Amino acid sequence: MSTTHYPAAPRRGAIAIVHLGLGAFHRAHQAIYLERYRQRSGDDAWGVSSANLRGNVGLVDGLAAAGHRYHVAEYTDSENVALREIGVVEETLFSGRGADGHWGRDLEALLARMAAPETRIVTLTVTEKGYFLNPASGELLLDDPMIAFDIAHSAAPRSAPGILVEALARRRAQGSAPFTVLCCDNMPDNGQRTRNAVLQLAERRDTGLAEWIAAEVAFPSSMVDRIVPAMTDADFARLAELGVEDPQAVICEAFSQWVIEDDFPQGRPAWEAEGVEMVADVAPFETMKLRLLNGSHSLLAYLGALAGIETVFEAVSREDLRALLRRYMLDEAAPTLAMPEGTDLAAYADSLLVRFANDSLRHRLQQIAMDGSQKLPQRWLQGALARIEAGGRVPCTALGLAAWIRYTAGHDLNGQAYPVDDPLASRFAELHQRHANDPGRLVAAFLAMDDVVPPALAGNSDFVLAVSNAYRRLTEQHLAGALAALERS
Ligand code: NAI
Ligand code: CS2
């Protein structure tokens, strides 16, 4: 094992960035760019206050107890790892629901930090569902209990959009310039979608505030890419063998990419020297990554989970699944992309298969499978509709959608049960119960969910037939049979 150590910068810095969503990806992606920037430039002005609005408070308090230092192990492969100590997170806060049932332990501290003029950027990784947007239309879910609460209690918000609105309201009231809002979640046009959520919520509070936000606040989009699996006990054991006993540690691949629209009126770190790509329009990069990488991930997740396969590495070890990914990426996704001249999508697709085959990451398919209702519109469905409207066929996507529908039943093809982790899970359970003996009606009912499936796609009879036939083959012939049938199509 070759291990390279990178200790954290010795000094502490001023806080100019607030992050919402203190998860694994934030710790292994944005925070590393900022740590490397601080160490290279000596610029101490861009420290981070990072908050969790959900989940347990353990990570927040664990980091505080550890002096806000943690480790990231970047694995090139199972024999080569870079071990980084990160110190750029200066503060951790929790505004979620505590074990005692009370919300907002550190909410006031979080809002004060965001309202402080020294805070110039707010970044987010709160998962696709954390914006409370209709996955298909991008409209704010005004009837969601969390959003309804924030409309009624605007000064004590619980959602990410609510917290952004209240913090911006305080900035406006005190006469301060706003901060820039930088979304780092896997959504298309993620800056605009975040802006939509914030404006729709602000309008229900004060049209003057909404107009001010619309005129004054920048919401640049970004494409983020680094495979950062949720930690397992085996991962912590591996780190212990390297001498790292750190409950807040994270493991990830060596690859990392960040492409950001350069729109920061209040200033930003000079990220470029750390390899961050600052561009005028991130959309082509974002769409390419979401449809090729994330679309392939979701194919593996649902088809693999139904066959009882546990990790990405195990799934891509199967030639039939690798062949499916290549066909999906090159025949169905790539033709829908408008990339800059000279972009080699075949090489990009091959590079993804190499990354997926990283034998040092235990990236669980069940983690990727979660929140499918929030992910599949941008990963498969918008691209499938574009491909069909251009006269193409999408048999791989149809098989993937059939696998997702079957996955939401909550047990695999061998009868092994698992929890379905999705904001719409109760709706799925009801549909499976109602159409338990009629697969055709079940598929039609899922395709009729217009908050997930674009109606124009659900109305395409060839696509509906392809999904129904794929569903039947999966349930009758299992994974190998369904893939073999696809191969012949
Ligand atoms: P994680 O499970 O470690 O963290 C999830 C974070 O989202 C936690 O901070 C949690 O408190 C927060 N959260 C969940 N639901 C929320 C809600 N309704 N409101 C507010 N906060 C909420 O997951 P991880 O790995 O950090 O991924 C988070 C997001 O980062 C992903 O959903 C994706 O958008 C993005 N991302 C993740 C990558 C990865 O490989 N893990 C790579 C690229 C992007
Ligand atoms: C994965 C992503 O969990 C998932 O949905 O597809 O988190 C994936 O690991 C990242 O987007 C890679 O950049």
Image (cartoon, helix red, strand yellow):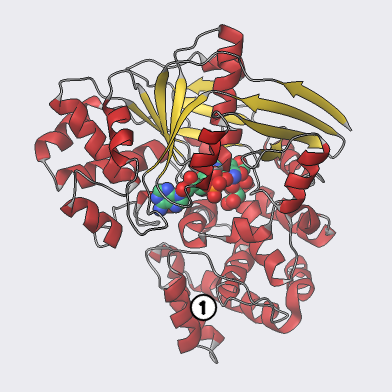
- Where is residue 36 shown, x and y percent of the image? 61, 18
Rendered position, 389 above or below 227: below
Q: Secondary structure at mark 1?
A: helix
- Seen at 57% across and 71% down, the residue is 419
Q: Residues within 10 Å of mark 1 (few under 14, many from 20)?
A: many
Which of the pair 233/324 is nearer the observer?
233
- Where is residue 350 shown, x and y percent of the image? 76, 41
Looking at the rendered image, the quarter that the N terminus falls into is top right
- Seen at 74% across and 35% down, the residue is 244
* Quadrant in the rendering for residue 309: bottom right
Rendered position, 163 above or below 120: below
Q: Does the image show residue 332?
A: no
Residue type at numbered disc 1: Val
Looking at the rendered image, the quarter that the C terminus falls into is bottom right
Name, please, the residue furthest toward the bottom.
Answer: 437
The residue pinned by badge 1 equals 443
- Where is residue 197 shown, x and y percent of the image? 29, 45
- Where is residue 84 shown, x and y percent of the image? 69, 26
Q: Is residue 333 left or right of residue 457?
A: right
